[in-house]
Image (cartoon, rainbow, N blue to C red):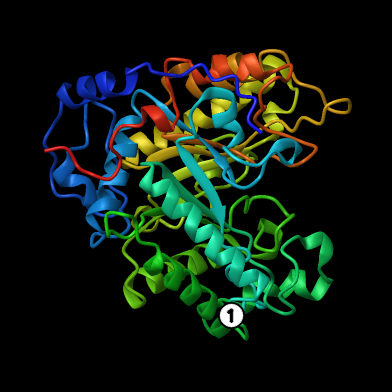
């Protein structure tokens, strides 16, 4: 049943602003070396130069276009996304995504996860639940691509000893102390980890859109690594160990397995207050396409102070992305509303969140809400107390949903 309150969002704002950006001042650049900083002095990335700033210089044409178009779009707009938008709904009201039920348009980005796909119990048979999830997730990603949307995959990888948990609260002290170290090159579980990367590569190479092209996607492994709740967190590996594993993972996927349709996203939580802190575990410009941040805490009913703190951190990654010619993103966020228990914050979407993302001229390519459940939501369905606030957010000048996305998979002439 779709009782939809659907004010269509036909603003035509993106195309106009992208034309302005493309016509704005540009500059030639000298030959670049790894980690060469580019100041924000009027530099505008040119389509033919996109691969110079990407992890994979052999990326497919569609993946190069995605990088370029996200970078260009970020100068004036940000894409609104949601994790599992096609399959998780508030009150289990299946059908259109909850964002589409509310606004008339799907989100511009679909979040997915390799969790079930790389599970030890996925045996590749049609009757296997994990394999069925693999097929469903791939189908969703292909549908999103066919709609012109962006795809972003997280990876809640289970620890390698028992293959059961990714939360340290569910692990033994031995597992917490050894899981990450064990998958490094030379570690006892390194071959196991390589098999998981091979599964990622298999899926990457199997997602083909209606146009016959491989589906590009953003890959965001080892997210929120500055916390301790995941086994890849800061208490369980040194900065150099984290950097070494990240670099190995990129090299294995790109150079050994020849996967050419991935953009790599680096994504701590919100515990940094400076670029030095943000870059403590940064593996280098040759290994990262997207500078991200997950941030729930600053927006968890912290008022204007929280909004300011969130914006300050987005300024840090925005400035780094401008300097390094990368894409900045708010890779996960949301305020979890359970009616009667945790109620909506007035103007959360249209003022708090929007201002956190856009104040001080930040250049953020996209943001992603976490998924809705039967009893809790991050984005309201129709008829809820904050539905109008979300519609107002969706109609803000810089927000972009699916129905107003520019062409993301073709470079301009």
Q: Quadrant of the N terminus?
A: top right
Instruction: Identify the residue shown where x is 48% and y is 69%.
Output: 200
Q: List x then y, in percent, for residue 100.
A: 54, 31
Query: Badge 1 local density, few (<14 within 10 Å), some, or many (20+)?
Result: few
Q: Is residue 299 in view from this perspective?
A: yes
Describe residue 291's horizontal placement relative to residue 71 as left or right: right
For the point 43% across and 38% down, the residue is 328
x 40%, y 37%: residue: 320
- x 59%, y 83%: residue: 187
Q: Is residue 89 above or below residue 63?
A: above
Q: Position of residue 190 (x, y in %)?
A: 56, 81
* Front residue (pair 239, 306): 306
Q: Identify the secondary structure beneath mark 1.
A: loop
**Residue 112 placement (x, y as % from top left):** 55, 52
Query: Given the current orientation, which residue lies at the most extreme right position?
Result: 340
Residue identifier under label 1: 125
Which x, y percent locates residue 199?
Answer: 50, 74
Q: Does residue 264 appear anywhere in the picture? A: no
Q: Is residue 72 left or right of residue 249?
A: left
């Amino acid at each position: 049943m779709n009782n939809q309150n659907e004010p269509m969002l036909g603003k035509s704002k993106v195309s106009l602003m992208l034309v302005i950006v493309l016509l704005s001042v540009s500059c030639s650049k000298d030959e670049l070396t790894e980690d060469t900083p580019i100041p924000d002095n009027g530099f505008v990335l040119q389509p033919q130069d996109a691969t110079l700033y990407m992890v994979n210089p052999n990326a497919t044409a569609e993946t190069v276009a995605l990088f370029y178009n996200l970078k260009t779009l970020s100068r004036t707009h940000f894409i609104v996304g949601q994790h599992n938008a096609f399959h998780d709904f508030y009150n289990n009201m299946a059908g259109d995504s909850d964002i589409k039920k509310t606004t008339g348009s799907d989100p511009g980005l679909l979040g997915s996860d390799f969790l079930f796909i790389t599970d030890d119990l996925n045996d590749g048979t049609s009757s296997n639940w994990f394999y069925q999830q693999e097929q469903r997730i791939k189908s969703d990603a292909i549908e999103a691509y066919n709609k012109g949307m962006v795809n972003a995959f997280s990876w809640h990888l289970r620890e390698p000893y028992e293959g059961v948990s990714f939360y340290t609260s569910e692990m033994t002290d031995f597992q917490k102390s050894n899981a990450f170290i064990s998958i490094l090159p030379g570690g006892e579980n390194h071959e196991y980890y390589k098999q998981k990367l091979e599964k990622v590569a298999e899926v990457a190479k199997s997602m083909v859109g209606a146009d016959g092209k491989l589906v590009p996607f953003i890959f965001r492994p080892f997210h929120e690594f500055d916390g301790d709740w995941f086994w890849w967190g800061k208490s369980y590996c040194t900065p150099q160990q984290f950097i070494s594993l990240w670099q190995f993972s990129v090299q294995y996927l790109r150079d050994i397995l020849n996967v050419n349709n991935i953009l790599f996203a680096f994504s701590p939580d919100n515990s940094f207050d400076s670029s030095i802190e943000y870059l403590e575990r940064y593996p280098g410009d040759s290994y990262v396409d997207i500078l991200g941040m997950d941030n729930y805490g600053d927006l968890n009913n912290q008022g204007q102070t929280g909004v300011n703190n969130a914006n300050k951190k987005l300024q840090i990654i925005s400035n780094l992305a401008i300097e390094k010619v990368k894409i900045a993103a708010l890779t996960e966020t949301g305020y979890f509303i359970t009616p009667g228990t945790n109620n909506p914050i007035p103007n959360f979407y249209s003022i708090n969140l929007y201002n956190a993302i856009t104040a001080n001229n930040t250049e953020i390519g996209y943001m992603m809400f976490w998924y809705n459940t039967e009893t809790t939501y991050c984005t309201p369905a129709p008829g809820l107390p904050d539905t109008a606030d979300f519609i107002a957010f969706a109609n803000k000048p810089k927000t972009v949903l699916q129905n107003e996305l520019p062409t993301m998979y073709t470079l301009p002439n």
